[in-house]
Image (cartoon, helix red, strand yellow):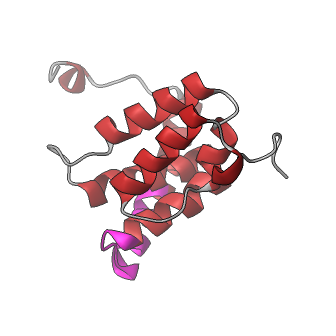
Amino acid sequence: MAMVRLVEYAEAEAGVRAVYDDIMTTRKTDWVNNFWKALAHHIPTLERIWSTVKVVMAPGAIDPLTKEMIYVAVSITNNCEYCIHSHIASARAKGMTETQFGELMAVVGLANENNRLANGYQIPVDAVFRQQF
């Protein structure tokens, strides 16, 4: 259950509707998902996060599918159920195959396990790795 009542388009104030309209236009869809409806209770946060999403998730040196797959990996690691579902759906819409998803999950699992091992053993970072920066 949400911690706040979700703000639907019909009841939203003008500033919220403007962001909702931009979300629908940018994403070429006729609906706004619940994440934005929850953020709508604080318009500065809604505007800031949407503005950042448009910049960060736009095509660039990293293609949009890869960005979505990275987002899925971080969401799994952070255990955000909402983001896991949302970004798997977005990655699939951008062409992620079941094979790619399987490999992504294998990498996420491996990275999380190895991160815990490296942290648990407090393994010092190799000098050659530090020299690369």
- Residue 111 visible from this viewpoint: no
Q: Nearer the viewer, residue 12 or 26?
A: 12
- Residue 99 visible from this viewpoint: yes
Q: How many marks?
A: 0
Give me the residue at 57% from left, 58% from top: 84
The x and y percentages for residue 63 are: 20, 54
Residue 112 belongs to magenta span: no
Q: Seen in the image, is 42 located left or right of residue 133?
A: right
Picture layout, residue 30 above or below residue 99? above
The x and y percentages for residue 91 are: 39, 65
Give me the residue at 66% from left, 42% from top: 12
Picture layout, residue 62 above or below residue 120? below
Q: Nearer the viewer, residue 102 or 114?
A: 102
Residue segment shown in magenta: 93-108
Q: Seen in the image, is 103 located left or right of residue 30?
A: left
Residue 101 belongs to magenta span: yes
Q: Nearer the viewer, residue 62 or 38?
A: 38
**Mostly what secondary structure, the magenta segment?**
helix
